[in-house]
Image: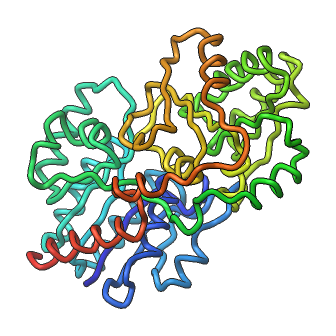
Amino acid sequence: MRILMISNHLGVQSGVQRYVQNLLLNLDTTKYKVDLFVGLCPADQASTAPALIAHGVNIIGVPDHKKDRIRALYRHLKNHKNYDIIHYHTASKIGAPVCAMMRALCPRAKIIVHSHIVYPPITLTWRAAHGVYQLFADYFLGCGVAAGRFVFGDYIDRKPNFAVACNAVDQGRFHPDAAARAATRAAWGVADSDKLAGFVGRLNHQKNPLFLVEVFAAMAQTDPAWKLLLVGAGEMEQPMREAAAKHGLTDRILFAGVQKDVPAFMNAFDLFLLPSNFEGSPVTLVEAQGCGVPCLASTNVPNDGSVTDLVHFLPLTAPLTKWAAKANEIAAHGDHTDYWPTLAAAGYELKTAARRMEELYDRLGARA
């Protein structure tokens, strides 16, 4: 079976790309011949390409710019029409006409569109996009119900050709690890007596990083044992550093940059913070739960991935003192508890999720 998978870019900081990598590394590439059409890796990130190539995925790398990617996709599909499945990861309105283009160029292929985002409000142009998606795609996936409704329409989850595809993670990597916890904390000068809050992700508007600094400042005011370790990079790093200096927290907010060994950092945390402005169903929230880390997120984060009692939510309008109090209440200092029985039962174990995707490919491909 020939599959074309279309994603954003090859950088490890992208939650979508980490999901795509996890999925592809667990597909049977002797049965499914996969072309990954994707933007080239941003300069400030490590690339997922080497692992994917080693697993047998053919990467079609194009410029990491939306319009350039669309033009390149058009040229590719004009000359390569023999796909059984096109699996299109999308988070935008422009994906709707792209879907129509794919249908025109590859009328035989079954098109799966896969939503990864929620960022209201839903405008009239989004309503129009809903109709175009539903007209030209064969099957709809969402990282959660909210993400499916936002990109494809309010009632998409009532249709038989919609399903939730959990942002599953690798239990073999994301699990409680006392040795990794101790080593990572020691490497970053975090003492046993310190309480370590953490964040993993892009330092951009979506993740609300300046509010994160304000939350941490309130936490630090209530308890001087708190430190904050940030894993990731982005355009708001410098404003965050300036905010840290303003609050006198330069020595307590640690910028780790982009890191490959995310499980080691997750294990080092006593608390995972995710006060995002908008999300789909963030992979990091599942990764944190896999490592047994309590999580404090904004109510702008859909609760699809909140499958254990580790996850707590507060509105962004709540007083900072309330955020600080909740952080102190839920933080777990010391070795973490294994929550994988609950996560696996909810479908967040990676190999199970990959087998379910293969079943969908087989079902749709048989009708191609």
Please identify the quarter of the rendering in which residue 48 is found.
Answer: bottom right
Q: Is residue 273 above or below residue 22?
A: above
Instruction: Tell me if 158 is positioned left or right of 238 in this view.
Output: left
Residue at screen point 26% across, 56% down: 113
Please identify the quarter of the rendering in which residue 366 is found.
Answer: bottom left
Q: Is residue 57 above or below residue 85?
A: below
Instruction: Tell me if 36 is positioned left or right of 244 in this view.
Output: left
Where is residue 226 drawn, in percent x and y?
79, 29
Where is residue 210 drawn, in percent x and y?
67, 24
Please identify the quarter of the rendering in which residue 36 is found.
Answer: bottom left
The number of numbered discs placed on residues in the rendered structure image is: 0
In the image, 278 versus 134, the foreground residue is 278
Instruction: Tell me if 132 is positioned left or right of 151 in this view.
Output: left
Q: Is residue 289 above or below residue 345?
A: above
Q: Furthest residue to the bottom?
A: 30
In the picture, which quadrant includes the C terminus?
bottom left
In the image, 45 versus 302, the foreground residue is 302
Q: How is the image coloured?
A: rainbow
Where is residue 279 drawn, in percent x and y?
45, 37
Residue at screen point 33% across, 23% down: 121
In the picture, which quadrant includes the N terminus?
bottom left
In the image, 292 versus 146, the foreground residue is 292
Instruction: Tell me if 68 is positioned left or right of 204 in this view.
Output: left
Residue at screen point 32% across, 83% down: 32
Residue at screen point 9% across, 47% down: 159
Where is residue 101 drawn, in percent x and y?
23, 59
In the image, 365 versus 224, the foreground residue is 224
